[in-house]
Image (cartoon, rainbow, N blue to C red):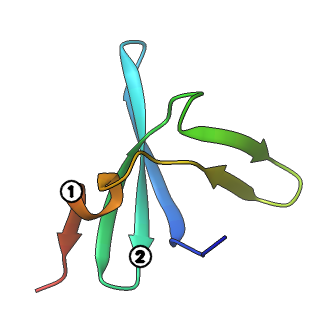
Amino acid sequence: GQHVGTVARVEGGAGGSRLVIDGDRGEILIPFAVDICVAVDVAAKRIRIDPPEGLIELNQRNRS
Protein backbone atom coordinates (compact mmCIF):
# COMPACT_ATOMS: atom_id res chain seq x y z
CA GLY A 1 0.00 0.00 0.00
CA GLN A 2 2.93 2.42 -0.10
CA HIS A 3 4.73 4.10 -3.00
CA VAL A 4 8.31 2.79 -3.29
CA GLY A 5 9.54 4.90 -6.21
CA THR A 6 9.75 5.20 -9.97
CA VAL A 7 11.29 2.60 -12.27
CA ALA A 8 14.45 4.19 -13.66
CA ARG A 9 15.49 1.21 -15.78
CA VAL A 10 15.39 -2.56 -16.15
CA GLU A 11 18.70 -4.45 -15.97
CA GLY A 12 19.54 -8.03 -16.86
CA GLY A 13 18.65 -10.44 -19.58
CA ALA A 14 17.47 -13.97 -20.21
CA GLY A 15 18.92 -15.20 -16.91
CA GLY A 16 16.83 -12.75 -14.91
CA SER A 17 15.96 -9.10 -14.79
CA ARG A 18 15.70 -6.55 -12.03
CA LEU A 19 14.02 -3.20 -11.69
CA VAL A 20 16.13 -0.24 -10.66
CA ILE A 21 13.78 1.97 -8.65
CA ASP A 22 14.49 5.63 -7.96
CA GLY A 23 13.24 5.90 -4.37
CA ASP A 24 13.18 8.79 -1.92
CA ARG A 25 16.47 7.76 -0.31
CA GLY A 26 18.24 6.27 -3.33
CA GLU A 27 18.12 3.39 -5.75
CA ILE A 28 16.33 0.18 -4.83
CA LEU A 29 16.95 -3.05 -6.74
CA ILE A 30 13.92 -5.33 -7.08
CA PRO A 31 14.04 -8.72 -8.86
CA PHE A 32 11.55 -8.67 -11.75
CA ALA A 33 10.04 -12.01 -10.70
CA VAL A 34 6.40 -13.09 -10.80
CA ASP A 35 6.26 -13.84 -7.07
CA ILE A 36 7.55 -10.32 -6.21
CA CYS A 37 6.08 -8.21 -9.04
CA VAL A 38 2.52 -9.46 -8.59
CA ALA A 39 0.71 -7.03 -10.91
CA VAL A 40 1.97 -5.11 -13.94
CA ASP A 41 -0.40 -2.50 -15.37
CA VAL A 42 1.25 -1.17 -18.51
CA ALA A 43 -1.54 1.30 -19.31
CA ALA A 44 -1.38 2.88 -15.83
CA LYS A 45 2.45 2.59 -15.74
CA ARG A 46 2.25 0.84 -12.39
CA ILE A 47 3.87 -2.28 -10.95
CA ARG A 48 2.56 -3.65 -7.66
CA ILE A 49 5.15 -5.57 -5.67
CA ASP A 50 4.90 -7.94 -2.72
CA PRO A 51 8.52 -8.14 -1.57
CA PRO A 52 9.70 -10.49 1.14
CA GLU A 53 10.30 -8.74 4.46
CA GLY A 54 13.57 -6.77 4.41
CA LEU A 55 14.12 -6.94 0.61
CA ILE A 56 13.71 -3.21 0.02
CA GLU A 57 16.03 -2.24 2.87
CA LEU A 58 18.60 -4.87 1.84
CA ASN A 59 18.68 -3.78 -1.81
CA GLN A 60 18.72 -0.02 -1.24
CA ARG A 61 21.68 2.06 -2.36
CA ASN A 62 21.60 5.28 -0.36
CA ARG A 63 22.29 8.56 -2.05
CA SER A 64 25.56 10.20 -1.08
Residue 19 versus residue 14 in the image, above or below: below
- Give the structural element (helix, strand or loop) at label 1: helix
Instruction: Measure how far apart labels 2 and 1 are at the Cα level.
Output: 14 Å
- Give residue 29's mark: none
Question: In the figure, residue 1 lies in which quadrant?
Answer: bottom right
Measured from the top left, where is residue 13 in percent x and y?
A: 40, 21
Image-based side of 5 in relation to 12, left or right: right
- Give residue 58's mark: 1
Question: In the figure, residue 56 lies in which quadrant?
Answer: bottom left
Residue 46 versus residue 37 in the image, above or below: below
Q: Amino acid at mark 2?
A: Gly
The residue sitting at 41% across, 76% down in the picture is 23
Q: Amino acid at mark 1?
A: Leu
Which residue was labeled with disc 2? 23
- Identify the residue at the far right of this view: 43
Question: Looking at the image, do the residues carrying marks 2 and 1 touch, with CB atoms under 8 Å apart?
Answer: no
Q: Residues within 10 Å of mark 1 (few under 14, many from 20)?
A: few
Q: Nearer the viewer, residue 15 or 47?
A: 47
Q: Residues within 10 Å of mark 2 (few under 14, many from 20)?
A: some
Q: Nearer the viewer, residue 9 or 29?
A: 29
Question: Where, quadrant-wise, is the C terminus in this rendering?
Answer: bottom left
The residue sitting at 89% across, 53% down in the picture is 43
Image-based side of 10 in relation to 63, left or right: right
- Give the structural element (helix, strand or loop) at label 2: strand
Q: Please identify, in this view, whether the residue under mark 2 or under mark 1 is nearer the observer.
A: 1
The residue sitting at 26% across, 64% down in the picture is 57
Residue 18 versus residue 17 in the image, above or below: below
The residue sitting at 59% across, 75% down in the picture is 3
Q: Nearer the viewer, residue 21 or 51?
A: 51
Q: How many marks?
A: 2
Measured from the top left, where is residue 15 in percent x and y?
A: 36, 13
The answer to which of marks 2 and 1 sits earlier in the sequence is: 2
